[in-house]
Image: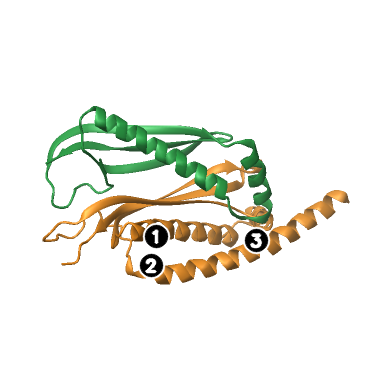
Amino acid sequence: MVDLIVLLVLLALGYGFGRYAEKTHYRSIIKREKLLRKIPAIASKFPPMYRNPPETILVTGGIVISVDYFKRFVASLRNIIGGRITSYESLLDRARREAILRMKEQARDQGGSMVFNVKIETASISKGRKNTIGSVEVFAYGTALLIKSN
Amino acid sequence: MLLTNLEIVPGKRITKHLGLVQGSSVRAKHVGRDIMASLKNIFGGELKGYTELLQESREEAINRMQAQAEKVGANAILNVRFSTSSIAQGAAELFAYGTAVVLE
């Protein structure tokens, strides 16, 4: 009985705080993505040719994000029936967009105008119980071009 | 020392390839951060302590890679890649590698 109450409290906490955190995070992501739209992140390896070649600088952005109790519970139910685990999808989507934003912010602060050869890497850095995901690290990096306007 | 993850450097010619250079750093999280992280596992959200920790260790890995490149006399590292692996419970390895070259 006590176990059940603890479980329900944890689920409620996870649901409440997790939902709130996700909502505010998405709001800030969308706002900053609009601001940083002028710095494109491009996966191409070869930058265009310029008459006076730009300086380059390595820019990185990373985030470690944790899944909440409610999402983990829903995912464990999903594991029984199979199918898409949307609760994890939104988590990874948030983490990836945040990592790219941080990379772009670093590029902007250094005066870069675009980021080339963007690579994104995901690593699960700590496992939860029964090998479920605990926290995920997403790391994005690329080369920023510092184009001098002439 | 110029670091880039492109294979070329715009406007510069590579005069010499000096081979692969690498740097790694294995870090463990400390207990305080672990307790915070386990709380966060209920509420969800960003683990700022871990983000910083991994950032620091990655810088350390980059520094080691740079030191190695300097030793072989390079002035740039091209095609830099990163990789992360959790090698044990509570410890992660951050690894950086790239090609050391001499630019004109």
The picture places residue A148, in percent across and down from the top left corner, at 20, 62
Q: Colour of chain A?
A: orange
Q: Mark 3 — residue?
A: A18
Give amino acid for label 1: Glu
Spatial CA span between label 2 and label 3: 26 Å
Same chain, marks 2 and 1? yes
Q: Is residue A57 left or right of residue B27?
A: left
- Tell me the subunit letter for badge 1: A
Spatial CA span between label 1 and label 3: 26 Å
The picture places residue B4, in percent across and down from the top left corner, at 27, 47
Q: How is the image coloured?
A: by chain
For this orientation, the residue located farthest to the right is A1
* Secondary element at image label 1: helix
- Tell me the subunit letter for badge 2: A
Give amino acid for label 3: Gly
Q: Mark 1 — residue?
A: A105
Give amino acid for label 2: Leu
Other-residue count near label 2 (Cα within 10 Å), few / some / many at <14 / 14–19 / ≥20 = some
